Amino acid sequence: MSGAPRATVLTAVHNGAPWLARSLESVLAQDFADFELIVVDDASDDDSPAILAATDDPRLRVLRNPRNLGLTVSLNRGLELARGAVILRHDADDLSLPGRFARQMALLDARPEVGVCGGFAIMADGEGRPLGTYRVPLGHAAIAWAVGFGHAFAHPAVAVRTGVLRAVSGYDPAWPVAQDQELWTRLVWTTRMANIAEPLVEYRQHAGMASRARGAEQRAADLRARGRFLERLLGREVPPELLRWNAVPPLPGAPGRPPGADARELAGFARVVLAALGAVRRRFCSTRAEAGAVGRLAGRKLHALAAGAAGARAPLLAARLLARAVILDPSLLAPAELARAARAARRALPGGRA
């Protein structure tokens, strides 16, 4: 392969021997072949270096860290060396499904305004058993909403134009975990984003991954990034205690993590959600269809908050949130269920009766 490749596949590995060989095979077997594969070995002390040394493919470039530096720094070291015009992220414990690279490169070729392209993921456990499908919103406005309130991308499935990533100085070294979520909060303002409505990777869930091994730290950093995005979006401070209600639904196969907060905080966060709905529509929506899609996502968020209000024994608040949710997304609740919620709310009023 002469000259610079069209794309750079960027991977970092630390003690990933159980999955690394198959992971590399899934990359090197892609039908789109005009790429270099940069693997940053983050000071592995298992068989990962031997597996990399035994991989006979001229597209592979290995950079070994002198000591364990973490994923964020490792990705930035690889980004510095990248020669491709597109960075195709790939994790060393995941599989890129057949045709993934070709689909993403085709979308980026057809839509020059798009700087970040992702897709769905098949979730699997450490043995490869399927756990479900990780779905993400497709259009830029819905993705912008998800940067604040949902799952915007599956990080190991993204393709990012190298110039777009370098223009924001890559990953922020101050974020050893949730570095992807923090990155989306910056990129969403600088480029258009899209997702492909089909699985592009098999995404492994196992005990050694950061979201499991450093779960509490990961969740705290995730919420901090979302809070920063919301403050920029709204132009005002969002009290940190309200963000406990912004815990997004867990990934398929991951344990649930219900937030702990009272009804007063929940009501405050519901006001943040409604303010953000208006702001996202003004800043990121250019069509009625986009505004409707974002509205439905907001409705689902309010629906989840209504369930939280019911659990916090605040039936009037629950009914109000539920009614607003159904206005935004009528598919959420059958009329009979809404009537039951209204009766519960009336009973909560002074002198109220069913």
Image (cartoon, rainbow, N blue to C red):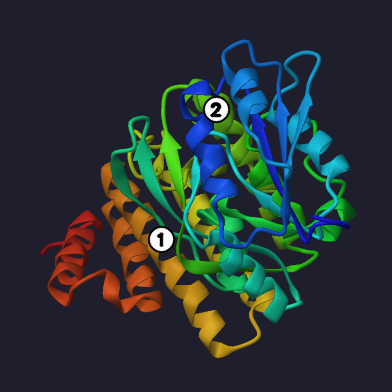
Residue 14 percent coordinates (x, y): 62, 22
Q: Secondary structure at mark 1?
A: helix
User: Label 2 sits on what residue type?
Assistant: Ala
Where residue 183 appears, as percent x and y from the top left, is 72, 48
Q: Where is residue 233, by image quadrant?
A: bottom right
Quadrant in which residue 77 is drawn = top right
Q: Is residue 184 above or below residue 257?
A: below
Residue on which the image places disc 1? 302
Q: In the image, what residue occupies the spot 67% across and 54% down?
A: 230
Q: Specify the amino acid type for callout 1.
A: Leu
Crowd tier of the residue under label 2, counting other residues whose Cα lies within 10 Å: few below 14, some 14–19, many 20 or above: some
For image coordinates 58% across by 25% down, the residue present is 217
Q: Is residue 106 above or below residue 223?
A: below
* 136 left or right, relative to 339: right
Closer to us: 184 or 242: 184
Q: Secondary structure at mark 2?
A: helix
Decide if residue 167 is on the left or right side of residue 308: right
Closest to the observer: 214 or 341?
Answer: 214
The residue to which callout 2 is attached is: 210
Whichever of labels 1 and 2 marks the residue nearer the N terminus, that label is: 2
Circle 1 crowding by C-alpha within 10 Å: few under 14, some 14–19, many from 20: many
- Kindly identify the residue that appears in the image at 62 percent across and 76 percent down: 281
Asked if residue 98 shows in the view, the reply is yes
